[in-house]
Amino acid sequence: MKKYIENLVLVLFALLVFTACSDEQGTEVGNDSQPKVTLYKYDAQPPLNGDNDVIVRVAANNKVQEAYYFVESIEGKEARGMTPDEYASFVVANGQKISEINGASDTDLIIKDLKGDVIITVVGVSGNNKHSSFVTFKGLDWVDIAEGTYYFAVANIKNMMGASKAATLQYCANEEGLYRIKDIYGEGYSLKFRDTGDTASDSGGEYKVLSIPAQPTPLTFGNYGAVSVRDVATWQNDDSWLTDNGMYEDNSCFFRLQYFVSAGSLGYGWDKFEPGV
C-alpha cells in the first residue's frame, strides 16, 4: 500500500510539472509558441505636438517575423465591419511595414498630425499566424477664434517673456469647452483652459468662468529648474477662486495665474488676452 501511494504521488507530481510547462509555453522569453506584439502609448513632448502627435512603442516576441501598422479613424474601422482576423489581414495588406521589428525586438513609432478619434493597429506575423494589438488616440482639432495681445502680470515671467506678445485664442472643435492661447510660451507650449459651464459677472459684464490646470512651460528660473503655471484655484485647491478666471462675449480673457517651480512660487497675478490689439 505504501509503495502504491508513493507511485501515485510521483504520477501526480509529473502531471503538475507537465501542466506548469504547458502554461509557460508562449510566456517565457524564447519559448513562445505564437507571435505577439504589445503596444505602449506615450505622450509626445516638444518639439513634437502633443495635441496631434503620439509615440507608440511596439514590443515583439521572438516568434514575430515581421510587423505592420495601420492608422485610421475609429469610425472608419467600424464601417469596414471586419472580423478581427479579417482586419489583421487587412492591416498586413494595406499597412506600413515596421522594418525594425524582426524576432524579439522593439521600436518606437512617431505618428504625427492626427485629427479626431483614431485607432492605431499593429499586426505581428509568423507564417500564417497573426497577432494584432491596438491603441487609440484623440487628435485635437483647433480653430482660431481671435488674434490679439497677451499681457503677462508676474514680474519674474515678464523678465523672461516681455510684458506682452501677439497671441491667438483658439477653441477645440472636438473636445467641448477646451480652449488655448496657442504657443504663448513657445512652440508646443500653449496655455490651455476649460469653460467650467458656470458664469459670473463684474464691471465688464457677464463672463464664462474658466479653469486652468497645472501645465508645463519651456521656461526655467535660475537653478530652480522648469517653470509651470496654474490658476490660483488649482494652487489653493479651492474652487471659490475660479471666478478670478473668465472670458467675455468679445473673447477677451483674464486669468489669475500662479507661476511656480518645484521649490515654490514665482508669483501670481492676472494675465490677460485682449483681441484685436
Image (cartoon, grey):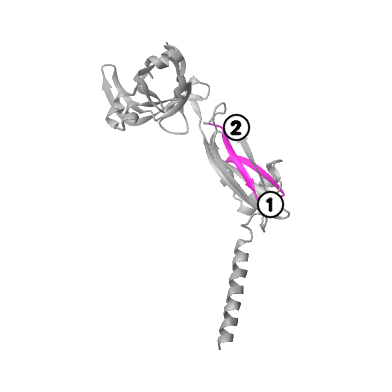
- Any magenta on residue 65? yes
Q: Residue at x 56, y 32 (%)?
A: 53
**Residue 26 image label:** none
Residue 40 seen from this side: yes
> Which tag is nearer the camera, tag 1 or tag 2?
1
Secondary structure mainly formed by the magenta segment: strand
User: Can you name the residue that lies furthest to the front here?
Assistant: 2
- Any magenta on residue 202? no
Q: Which residue is mark 1?
A: 62
Q: Quadrant of residue 175?
A: top left
Residue 148 in the image, given as x and y percentages of width and height = 44, 14
Task: Using the image, determine if residue 195 lies above or below residue 91.
Answer: above
Residue 109 in the image, given as x and y percentages of width and height = 63, 37
Mark 1, secondary structure of its residue: loop
Q: Confirm or deny contact between disc 1 and disc 2 (CB under 8 A).
A: no
Range of magenta residues: 51-75
Residue 144 in the image, given as x and y percentages of width and height = 48, 22
Amino acid residing under circle 1: Asn
Residue 145 seen from this side: no
Amino acid residing under circle 2: Lys
Task: Using the image, determine if residue 201 lies above or below residue 149.
Answer: below
Q: Which residue is mark 2?
A: 112
